[in-house]
Image (cartoon, helix red, strand yellow):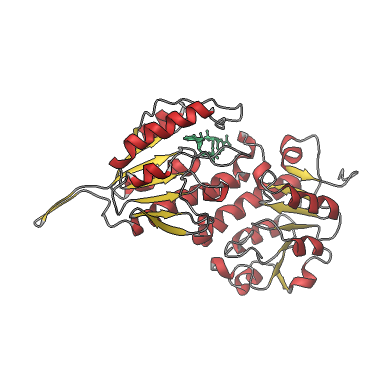
Amino acid sequence: MAVPRESASGERRVALIPEIVSKLGARGFEIVVEHGAGLGAGFDDASYEAAGASLLEGGALYDGSAATVRVAPPTADDVARLTPGTVLAGFLAPLADPAGIERLRDRGVVAFAMESIPRITRAQSMDALSSQATVSGYKAVLLAADRSPKMFPLLMTAAGTVAPARALVLGAGVAGLQAIATARRLGAVVSAFDVRPAVREQVESLGASFLDLGVTGEETEGGYAKELTPEQQAEQQRALEERIPGFDIVITTALVPGRPAPRLIPATAVESMAAGSVIVDLAAEAGGNCELTVPGEETTAHGVTIVGLTNLPSLMAADASRLYARNIQALLEHLGPDGELVLDWDDEITAGACVTRPEGASE
Ligand code: NAD
C-alpha cells in the first residue's frame, strides 16, 4: 500500500498517519510511505518507520504496490506512475473533473473516490466528505474571528459593554453545523439558514436561531438539497439582502452536489453590509455562494473582507489527516478485511465508491 507525498499545490495533508499505519500493519497490510509525505501535517519519516512503514523515494514507491492512497486528486504525472490494474483511493472529484477520471480509466486503474462512498450508516466511518467538512466549518469561524475587528463574546467590563458579534451561517449541512457550534463556543449570537426544512431543529439544538428567508427547497433521497428554481433563487437573494446588514460575520457553506454553488449573496448585498464585516465562503471551490468571492483569494469589497480560500482542511493538516486516515483505514478494511484486497462488486459500498475499473477487475 503506497502513501505518496501529495503533489497538489498547497496540500499539507497526508492520507495515512503513523497511528493508522500500525493499525493497518496489524491487519496484514504492508505500507510504503514516500519520504517527507507526512511533514506538512507534522508527522516525520521516523514516526512512520516506528509504526512499521518502509520509507521510499517516489520512483520506487509504486513497484509492487497493490494500492495507492492519497488525499487530493492525482496529476497526470502521478497517474502515469501508477501500475495498470492497481487500486487508488482518494478524493478524485468525479463530478467536477471527468477528465481526471478518464485519465485513470485510460491507465487501467481501479479507482475509488472518497466523494462517491454512499452515505449510508454502514459507511459512516469512511465518510471523508463529512470529516473534512467538519474541519472546514471549524476553521472558517476561526478565520472570520481573526479577520473581524469585533470580539465574538458579550463582555461587560469597567470600560463598558462590548456587544456580541452576530454571525449568520448559510447552509447547515456538516460544515455549517460545525461552524454554528464553533461560533457559539466563541460567544457569538448565531443565526442560520438552509433550504432543507429538516435542518431547523438541528440549528436550534445548537443554540442558534433559524433565519426564515421564506424559501423551502426539496431534498433528494440521499438527504442532499435540490437546486432551487430561478424564482426561488431570486426570492432567497432578495430576502437575504434585506437581512444581511444585521450581521458582522457570514459563513456560507451552501452546495448542491455536481452543480455550481448556489449564488446566495449578490454584490448589492455585500454593499449593504457594514464596513469591517467578514464573509467566509466555503463554497469558493464550486464558484462561491457570494458573487464577489474570488476562489483561492482573500479580497475586500465595500469594506467587507471576503475569504475565498479553497482548502481549509489543509490549514489544519494534522487533525484533518488524522480524521481522513481513519476514513481511509475503514475503506481499506472494507475492501480487504484480512490485509488483501478482495473486491466484491455486489457490495453497495465497493461498487458505489468505484468510479472506474478495467473490465474484468473482479477480484
Ligand atoms: P453539502 O455540502 O452538499 O451542502 C451543504 C448544505 O447546503 C446542505 O445542508 C444543503 O441543504 C445546503 N444548501 C444547498 N442549497 C442551498 C441554498 N440555496 N440555500 C441554503 N442552503 C443550501 O451537504 P453536506 O453537509 O455534505 O450534507 C448534506 C446532508 O447529508 C445532510 O442532511 C447530512 O446530515 C447528510 N449526511 C448524511 C450522512 C450519513 O448518513 N452517513 C453523512 C453526512 C451527511
Left or right relative to 83: residue 288: left
Between 352 and 342, the one lying in front of the other is: 352
The residue most toward the right is 360
Q: x%, y% of residue 266?
A: 43, 41
Q: Quadrant of residue 276?
A: bottom left
Tell me the quadrant of the picture where the N terminus can be found.
Answer: bottom right
Establish if 191 lies above or below 131: above
Between 204 and 10, the one lying in front of the other is: 10
Between 289 and 121, the one lying in front of the other is: 289
Taking the image as drawn, is residue 43 in sight?
Answer: no
Q: Residue at x 43, y 41 (%)?
A: 265
Q: x%, y% of residue 51?
A: 64, 66
The residue most toward the left is 158
Q: Residue at x 38, y 48 (%)?
A: 182
Taking the image as drawn, is residue 302 in sight?
Answer: yes
Establish if 58 lies above or below 65: below
Q: x%, y% of residue 211?
A: 35, 32
Left or right relative to 95: residue 246: left
- How many marks overall? 0
Q: Residue at x 55, y 31 (%)?
A: 225
Establish if 333 lies above or below 38: above
Q: x%, y% of residue 159?
A: 10, 57
Left or right relative to 122: residue 134: left
